[in-house]
Image (spheres, grey):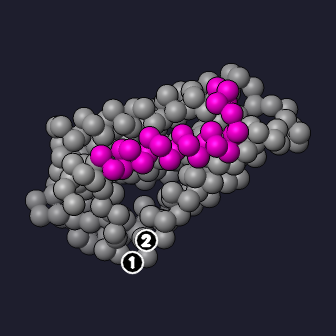
Amino acid sequence: MSLKSQFLIRLFLGMIVVPGALFACAGSVKFWQGWAWLAVFLIPFVVFMSYLYQHDPKLLERRMRVKEKISAQNLAQVAGPLIFFACLMLSGLDYRFGWSRTVSRPVPVWLTLFSDAWVLGGVLLIFWVMRVNSFAARTIQVEAGQPVISSGPYSFVRHPMYLGAAMISLANPFALASWIALPASAPLLPVIVLRLLGEERFLRRELPGYSEYCLRTRFRLVPLAW
């Protein structure tokens, strides 16, 4: 299948499946927190993926690949989307049935808006990574001629794309006004940690200069912490 066909199919599915799952579970289109979240998460991704299609199709092709060469990493490829949709659907159901309002106070509006900004920050960080590193594939691999990237967000942490994903994962439940969805979203963090540790072992073996980069850039995921 051509890159254009893959891109259009995934774009169409993303714009239908994600909002559809959210609002079907919510049982109403009056779920304003859902619309706000779509504005800071889905719309920027659609715009940026369209930009890549025009200006960096090689990177877009790398982002389309899902089959891992390292079999142990296939778990992360499966677990990530499952956790994402579990959080999404649970948030919608929470809006419909009012679980968070029953067990606690509703998520305050200020926290929802702050979390929307946090989600957008994670999305923009991921975009920054892809602008700096055209080899930022979705799967763990090393290609011929691939350099070690140490500029931009890579000067702060070794895995800035995973940092962006962690920011989004932690903020999504609050952006969608659901205390209940937080336990569903939180498991993505250990999945990210296990994946990046495996990725580091692979890159130290296969990517010349990566071990030296790790010595220069101390923190893996969180600046000044780890």
Q: How many marks?
A: 2
Dominant secondary structure, magenta: helix
Q: Position of residue 31 (x, y in %)?
A: 67, 30
- 208 over 38 or under it: above or below: below
Q: Which residues are magenta?
A: 8-32
Q: Residue furthest right?
A: 102
The quadrant where residue 156 appears:
top left
Q: Residue furthest top?
A: 110
The residue tagged 2 is 74
Q: Would you say 128 lies left or right of 97 here?
A: left
In the image shown, does 70 or 56 lie closer to the viewer? 56
Q: Residue at x 44, y 40 (%)?
A: 15
Question: Is 114 part of what is drawn in magenta?
Answer: no
Residue 100 seen anywhere in this rendered image of the structure: no
The quadrant where residue 170 appears:
top right
Q: Would you say 20 lies left or right of 144 here?
A: right
Residue 199 seen anywhere in this rendered image of the structure: yes
The reply to whether dot 2 and dot 1 touch (C-beta < 8 Å) is yes
Q: Residue at x 74, y 37 (%)?
A: 95
For the residue marked with disc 1, what is the amino acid? Ser
Label 1: few (<14), some (14–19) or many (≥20) C-alpha neighbours in 10 Å: few
The quadrant where residue 151 appears:
top left
The residue tagged 1 is 71
- What SS does tag 2 mark? helix
For the residue marked with disc 2, what is the amino acid? Asn
